Image: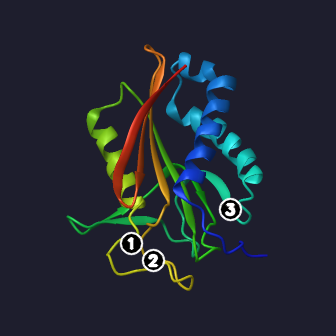
Amino acid sequence: MGAIRRSYGVDELLNLFLQANEMFLKKDIELLLLNVSERSWYSRFATYLEDLRKKYHLVGYRVDTEYNRSDAGKIKSILDNHTFQIIPITCDIILHSGGKNKFQDNLLCIEMKKSTALKKEKLEDKKRLSLLTKVSFDDVWSADGKALPEHVCGYVLGIYYEVNEKKRFVYIETYWYGAKTDNFTISF
């Protein structure tokens, strides 16, 4: 059974993310306070997204961590429009149809970082979110519901999630249509 042909918007996906974040901060706060590896956060956060995915009736979609394959089994990549460099892609957490819903394959991508990470690493994550949320990688492909683009793009919403465990807050940036659209903090 294929995914239902329905369009999911930024507000709906941001609400989904914020609810998952609330659950994560409530139930798994020790992961942040103990300063464990970011990779330890992904799977916990993903379980809350998966539970909420069902509540939001996201039929045909799934949550994956460190996912790097396209529907044909090729390594996922993005195209940097400025350098025309093809970059292999592995995003921390994604909500997608795995290539099954060509009408709207990619919904949510999340990159997580510690506030103590190198500035270069933070900028790479933000650039990745910008490229992943572009409507098309080459400004030609459109979501016609028939074919997927060669490079990953078209995520409805991108989230940059940076944890400062010492000051006890999460800094969040949102991305859509290839650009940063907002930022805010949530205390814990």
Q: Nearer the viewer, residue 135 or 31?
A: 135
Q: Quick check: 146 left or right of 172?
A: right
Disc 2, SS = loop
Q: Give the image's coloring scheme.
A: rainbow
Residue at image point 62% right, 18% down: 30
- Residue at label 3? 61
From the image, which quarter does the C terminus lie in? top right
Disc 1, SS = loop
Name the image quarter holding residue 96.
bottom right
Residue at image point 51% right, 83% down: 144
Residue at image point 50% right, 60% down: 156
Q: Position of residue 12 (x, y in %)?
A: 60, 52
Q: Position of residue 44 (x, y in %)?
A: 66, 36
Q: Is disc 3 in contact with disc 2, using a CB cutoff of under 8 Å?
A: no
Spatial CA distance of label 2 from label 1 is: 8 Å
Disc 3, SS = loop
Q: Amino acid at mark 2?
A: Pro
Q: Position of residue 119 (x, y in %)?
A: 27, 34
Q: Nearer the viewer, residue 67 or 80?
A: 80
**Given the current orientation, which residue lies at the most extreme front position?**
11
Q: Earlier in the sequence, mark 3 or mark 2?
A: 3
- Residue at label 2? 149
Q: Is disc 2 in contact with disc 1, using a CB cutoff of under 8 Å?
A: yes
Q: Nearer the viewer, residue 178 or 151?
A: 178
